[in-house]
Every structure is written in structure tokens, then in C-alpha cells.
Image (cartoon, rainbow, N blue to C red):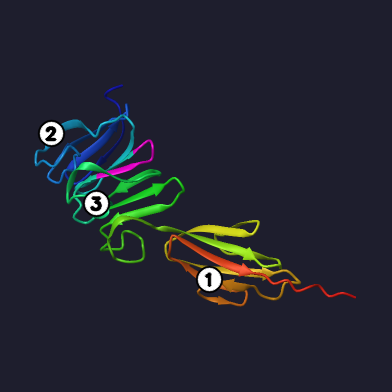
Amino acid sequence: GADTWTTASAGWNHSVAIRSDGTLWAWGGNMYGQLGDGLSPTDSWQPKQICAGTDWVSVAAGENHTVALKSDGTLWAWGDNTYTQLGCGATCPLPTGSPQQIGSDFVSVSAKYRHTLAVKRDGLLYTWGDNGYGQLGNGTTTSASTPQQVSAALFVTKSGSGGGTITGTGLTCSDNTCSGIYDYGTTVVITATADAYSGSNATWYNCPNGSGSTCTVSVTSAATAITAQFNDNAAPTG
């Protein structure tokens, strides 16, 4: 019914919630525009509908900012942006009382004190905002003004006229390609085992630390690609 709710979130001095009809509501403090109805110091003592539409599926309140997700996967944010917690970079005001689209293909979102996290349909995690305590998980204490991928992909391709197998923790192989998703900064040891007539070791390409049959790589970019080339040494005859 009209008075039933599906989800709610509490910020420092404001609250947001979604009704069962998909409408979005907010109440409480509005000094930073966190209610999403424009920049106004006027607080609301009771829930009021904000942001047109009946397709809201998730909402999260930070200290003084709000992020919300629509059923089409678009992510929207408004409120305080002092610590770049809205994720819209230099394109939005500081603060903003009107929703700013941050991206698309998202399936979940969470907001805390001055930072935000969200997951996309492909399972990859993104974070942005204040990072003074490393809360963004990107291996630094540098803040981010736009969504930054925390998870990272590793791809290993087999090439050459010879044959062999690729193994490594978290890698899944199919035909001549292996791949895996890792937390930012994960160190992966890849082993290339050549077939009997393909030489004792593979030749590594784009591997920062390759030695013999192993390649050690730290996954610190959105996509890291390594190639292991197996040489074909003909089988003895006679």
C-alpha cells in the first residue's frame, strides 16, 4: 500500500527511504541539500517526496550526502561534496541540492561518513570520496572525486606454436585464455607448465617479474594482461 516501505537509510541528521510504489522520500536536515529538493537551509520534519519517478530501488545516506539507485542501473547523488563523496568530479557544484547522475550499470550502493561505495552488474566494486584512512581500498590515502575500481581483472593468454597449461590462484582458464578478478593490490603467481615437447619454460610478455616458469604480478590496474608463449620443439624421431 501507499504507507509501506521497502528500504531506508539514516545519515547524520537526515533520513531517506523508498516506498513500495518506487517513490523516493527524505526528511531531516537540509543544510547541504542532502534532501535532494534544491539548496535550502529549510529542514523537513516529516517525509516528503523527492526526485520524480517511481523506479527507485535503493538509497543510502552518508553524513550529509545521499546516493540512490534506479531500476535501470543509473546511480544518482546529491548533498555535500566537500570531500568529493558525490563522485561527479569537477562537473557538479559543491554542494548540490539536485540529483547528479554518477554512472550506470550499478546494482547496489552504500554511503558512509564522507565516502561512497557501489557495485556494478559485472561484480566490480567502485569507491570514491574521502580516503584519509584508506577507506576507499585503493592502496593509497588519496581521495577520489569519481568512482575508482577497487577490484581488478587479470588476463593471461597462451600463445605460440607449442602447448602447455597456465595455473594461478583465482585464475579460471578456457581454451587459450585465463582470467580472474582480484582485490586491488593482490599479488598473483602464475605458473606456465610446458608440454613435453614445448621446451622447459614459457616466454613471458608484459610480465613485470617473470622468471623461468613463473610470473609474479601485482594486480593494481583495471585490467592487467600477460602473455605466456610456448615454443614448439619437435618430438624426436627414430
Note whether residue 114 is visible: no
Q: Nearer the viewer, residue 203 or 47?
A: 203
Q: Residue tagged by mark 1? A: 206
SS of the residue under disc 2: strand
Tell me where residue 166 appears, x and y as whole percent.
63, 64
The residue range painted magenta reads: 70-77
Amino acid type, residue under disc 1 in the picture: Asn
* Sequence-first tag of 1 and 2: 2
Mark 1 and mark 2: Cα distance apart in space: 59 Å
Tell me where residue 78 appears, x and y as whole percent.
22, 44
Q: Which label belongs to residue 18?
A: none
Mark 2 and mark 3: Cα distance apart in space: 31 Å
Query: Badge 3: how crowded within 10 Å, few (<14), some, or many (20+)?
Result: few
Query: Badge 1: how crowded within 10 Å, few (<14), some, or many (20+)?
Result: few
Going 61% across and 68% down the picture, which residue do you hit? Answer: 228
**Mark 2 vs 3: CB contact within 8 A:** no
Q: Residue tagged by mark 3? A: 91
Q: Residue tagged by mark 2? A: 45
Image vertical order of residue 37 relative to residue 129, above or below = above
User: Mark 1 against mark 2, which lies toward the viewer?
Assistant: 1
SS of the residue under disc 3: helix
